[in-house]
Amino acid sequence: MHFGDGKRKVDYVLAYYYRHRSSQQNGSPTNPRPPAVIVSNGNSVTPEEIGKTPPEQPLPGELHNQQQKVQEHNQLKQQKHDHQHSQNGNSSCHPHEVVVVEMSHHDALEEEKKIQREEFEHNLIEAGLEMEKDPETKQQGLNFVRIHAPWQVLSREAEFLKIKVPTKKMYEVKQESGIMSKLNSVWNKCTKPLQPNVPQISENTKMKPLSYPFSRDKMHLYNIKDKETFFDNATRSRIVYEILKRTSCTKAKYSMGITTLIANHVYDSAYSLHDGDYDHNKGEMNERMLLHREWARYGAFYKYQPIDLIRKYFGEKIGLYFAWLGLYTWLLIPASVVGIIVFLYGCVTVDTDVPSKEMCNEEDTFTMCPLCDKSCDYWNLSTACATARASHLFDNPATVFFSVFMALWATLFLEHWKRLQMRLSYFWDLTGLEEEEEHPRPEYETKLLLMKEKWKACKNGKKEKLTWRDRIPAYLVNFAAILFMIALTFSAVFGVIIYRITVASALAFSANEGTRANVRVTVTATAVIINLVLILILDEIYGSVAKWLTEIEVPKTEKTFEERLILKAFLLKFVNSYASIFYVAFFKGRFVGRPGSYAYIFNDYRVEECAPGGCLMELCIQLSIIMLGKQLIQNNLFEIGIPKLKKLFRKLKDDRTEPGEDNLNSSREPQQWDRDYALEPFTGLTPEYMEMIIQFGFVTLFVASFPLAPLFALLNNIIEVRLDAKKFVAELRRPDAVRAKDIGIWYNILSGIGKFSVIINAFVISVTSDFIPRLVYQYMYSQNGTMHGFINHTLSYFNVSHLKPGTQPENSQFAQNVTFCRYKDYREPPWSPNQYDFSKQYWTVLAVRLAFVILFQNLVMFLSAVVDWLIPDIPKDISEQIKKEKSLIVNVFLKEEHKKLQLIENFIMHDKQRSKTENRGRRSRAASFCQFSRSQRGSFTSFSSHHTEV
């Protein structure tokens, strides 16, 4: 964690691979390893100087302020190098003859990278940073540059970045009073075992320090006890990273920042260090150990998250993610409870459900039309009894209430998050945070450089930035690629549909009666599994495609790049995850036709239709398998397995040692920068948010068909929180601390899904379920106002003599002759003048369905708007505290200015009094001197008169 002197912290590390030519090898495996070189402000301690240091000189590892020694050493080294070249060359050469040394392409690239590194590191030293670097003793290998920021740099950059720090002034935080205070106290006592055992950073006492942006002119205001610990490690690393991002390197192709050099492979990576080991059974306790013990273990699943410590260690952006994830998981508990109640209601009322009883009545059953041509026979509706009873578990009046509840729950969740976000912003000193101007991305600079050269060649003027005209080709490629990917998703869904139809037809031709009875279950289960595998594969492809499409757009800043990547990835993954579910919910069984006039695919296969109990049960199966499969395989197994495979690959890649060459690093104990380099680099929070956003869609969009979705999401998130925590603490390099006051574009996506879910659930209830047909029958067509006769009302008649030739069942098992068969639809009977046309009941049900969609949507939207209006975005106590903090800051600076004015006035008064006293003394001395001079003669008299005038 420190330099070789054991005093200066390592605030940042740069890692790079080097490769020497054989003639430039700096050492051999048999020689002892030279000590590291520490450089500060152009002054360095070289290995040769360390070896010649007399006892009275500073110890090795300490800084020298002897620039002359460094220059002399470099001159001697250059003379020695020239002398070696003259000895190795031809002795007959002329002294002034130039010797041309041929270098391979790889050697030239390595030399160019070395020059760029030297210039960049020199500029870092000029910026005030201090560096420690191991000598390059091997022919090729990995080397680290450790960077330390002294107090002068930290204070300068903290003032430039306007980092808020606590002052000496403390003020009382207003506490809740009355009933809420007592309830809060009781709740805290009840949940005390669930609280993590970590030192509280904020909200732990009634007092809060007044925070103000750091200023070197107001050092007396801040509570600076120790300059080395005043800025925590995350803040120190953030300051160094800001310097690295804006430090120029003119010898590089582009001029700005460490990101450009990493993109050009001048450096391999740049990262800040973890606070030691994470195993809390080893060594002295640090924040990383504390996080692992109280947060990043599966054994701590029941505890609250130490959000303040997470924010302190990883920064505000990651702290906000885990705060959002924790709130989402916490609010899934009431949603899960209500979902379980709705499911249990369906279980309790299944035996009293009249339509289910009518379907299961074997005495008064209905003879149904064949499900396929030739091989399928007539069948009794009572055979679908199990499907009807299972459908009632999810298709009952309680699901309508649950849909309304979940729409309001989504609104409450977003409102609660806005309030929590403001509370965290206040306690984390993020109020009034301004967005910092970002440096352009390396790819943007590359594109701009090429465009400048092109414009210079055309002499069309100076090119300062990329315009929309420059990006038109990229936009066209994006549009075409996204359309192609969406078409690919629909093609995958269509392929699964063809699989279901063909396999069902093949199994129907089988002579095995047992197989025929289980055709629908077998086909549905295998098709959903195939669909899940396709979704997982396409998800990975779409993630890479979205990144590529965003890269060719060449966004200017990282923030713009991230937002565009999120939108593309979300669009593609949303379509991929929900396309098959939308098909089952709104399209399956809608365009089947009727007996005697069925719709066919490829002129041979009938379009598939829903089960006798409706499509809602199949929608429930589809939704549950895809949701659970994605959570189990993609969110958990992939997150655990892929990082371990990448870590193994990196380890095999890094163990590169030439034959016959010993690895000098193996002789010493691995340092913290060695252990952190072996970890997986942090690539951003986009994958973590994307998982939860897609899950949020499963929970809200089709919740009317699967009330247990919140429960499964809750169980997954309990594991997901600890899995992400373990990944951040133990498996990833420490991310750079980034200040953020909100979760950005993800909130807009959540809000959009919440509003879209209202429309989707309205259509699921009205179109997919039997809620509307039952309602219409009970209040418009039932003779006694009950559901008796509902099944007969929904079944139409068909004359079997009207079947097309060649489609009649072969070898029918029905003993009696069938004249009429029934099918589920609202059509006129064969004895009607308008036979098989849509009946009056069909148009009535359709009108009520559309009316229900409009009524449901507007009612829920209105209730959501009321909830949004009733709940203020900023809690009242936080709003008052922010105002109080602003007034306190004004008072503090007014008092400071008042003290300054008093000091100035006192100084002026004291100066006036002093000048008056001096003037009186001068006059008295002058008068006495005049009396004395009158008694004198000659020239002395004239001198005394002149002195009196003066």
Image: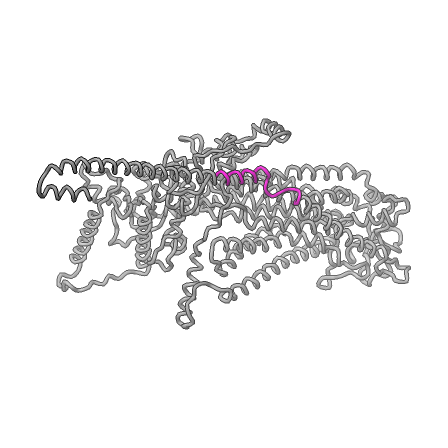
- In front of the other: 467 or 712: 467
Q: Position of residue 332 (x, y in %)?
A: 63, 39
Q: Is 483 drawn above or below residue 824 in the view shown?
A: below
Q: Position of residue 524 (x, y in %)?
A: 69, 50
Q: Position of residue 329 (x, y in %)?
A: 60, 39
Answer with left or right where residue 73 lies relative to residue 801: left
Q: Is residue 385 magenta?
A: no
Q: How many marks?
A: 0
Image quarter (top left, top right, bottom left or bottom right) of the N terminus: top left
Name the residue furthest left: 938
The prevailing secondary structure element of the residues shown in magenta is helix
Using the rendered image of the protein, determine whether residue 292 is visible from the camera's viewpoint: no
Q: Is 692 drawn above or below residue 82 in the view shown?
A: above
- In front of the other: 2 or 919: 919
Q: Quadrant of residue 452?
A: bottom left
Residue drawn at (70%, 42%), measured in percent from left and top?
Answer: 405
Q: Quadrant of residue 941?
A: top left
Answer with left or right where residue 144 lies relative to residue 625: left
- In front of the other: 252 or 268: 252
Q: Position of residue 633 (x, y in %)?
A: 57, 45
Residue drawn at (33%, 52%), measured in percent from left and top?
Answer: 120
Image quarter (top left, top right, bottom left or bottom right) of the C terminus: top left
Q: Which residues are magenta?
A: 868-888
The way the protein has been coloured in the rendering is: one colour
- In front of the other: 694 or 22: 694
Using the rendered image of the protein, determine whether residue 248 is visible from the camera's viewpoint: yes
Q: Is residue 887 magenta?
A: yes
